[in-house]
């Protein structure tokens, strides 16, 4: 399946990825500070889930960026699209 990303979708992916990274950092930091075993377990589970989600988001971002590079390299130059040659 040929999946294309619009610019706003790529930007949303980057924003969600940044937010998830902050959440992951906080969960890992809080894990160290928390003394309650159940809360510590929940924080560890959250950190592990966030790691997996960040990997998936980064894969999607990589595909979106590759798509953007391909689109830029295959786009005709301004004169070429009007039949003007240098």
Image: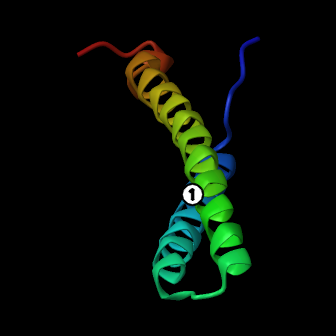
Report the residue marked by disc 1. 17
Q: Tell me which corner region of the image, top left, top right, bottom left or bottom right, holds residue 52.
A: top right
Is 73 left or right of 12, judged from the image as shown?
Answer: left
Q: In what quadrant of the picture does the C terminus appear?
A: top left
Who is closer to the viewer here, 31 or 3?
Answer: 31
Who is closer to the viewer here, 10 or 30?
Answer: 30
Q: So how many labels did they put on this image?
A: 1
Q: Residue at x 59, y 36 (%)?
A: 60
CA neighbours of label 1 inside 10 A, class few (<14), some (14 to 19), many (20+) = many
Residue 24's spot in the image, x, y percent? 54, 67
Q: Is residue 62 above or below residue 84?
A: below
Q: Residue at x 67, y 63 (%)?
A: 46
Q: Is residue 24 above or below residue 61?
A: below
Q: In what quadrant of the picture does the N terminus appear?
A: top right
Q: Residue at x 57, y 57 (%)?
A: 17
Per the image, label 1 sits on a secondary structure element best described as helix
Who is closer to the viewer here, 30 or 2?
Answer: 30
Q: Tell me which corner region of the image, top left, top right, bottom left or bottom right, holds residue 83.
A: top left
Is 26 left or right of 50, judged from the image as shown?
Answer: left
Residue 13's spot in the image, x, y percent? 62, 52
Residue furthest left as drawn? 86
Residue 18's spot in the image, x, y percent? 52, 64
Who is closer to the viewer here, 17 or 79?
Answer: 17
Residue 63's spot in the image, x, y percent? 54, 29
Q: Is residue 29 above or below residue 14?
A: below
């Amino acid at each position: 399946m040929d999946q294309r990303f619009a610019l706003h979708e790529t930007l949303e992916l980057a924003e969600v990825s940044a937010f998830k990274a902050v959440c992951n950092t906080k969960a890992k930091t809080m894990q160290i500070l928390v003394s309650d075993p159940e809360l510590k377990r929940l924080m560890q589970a959250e950190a592990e889930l966030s790691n997996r989600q960040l990997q998936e988001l980064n894969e999607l971002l990589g595909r979106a960026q590759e798509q953007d590079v391909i689109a830029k390299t295959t786009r005709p130059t301004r004169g070429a699209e009007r039949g003007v040659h240098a």
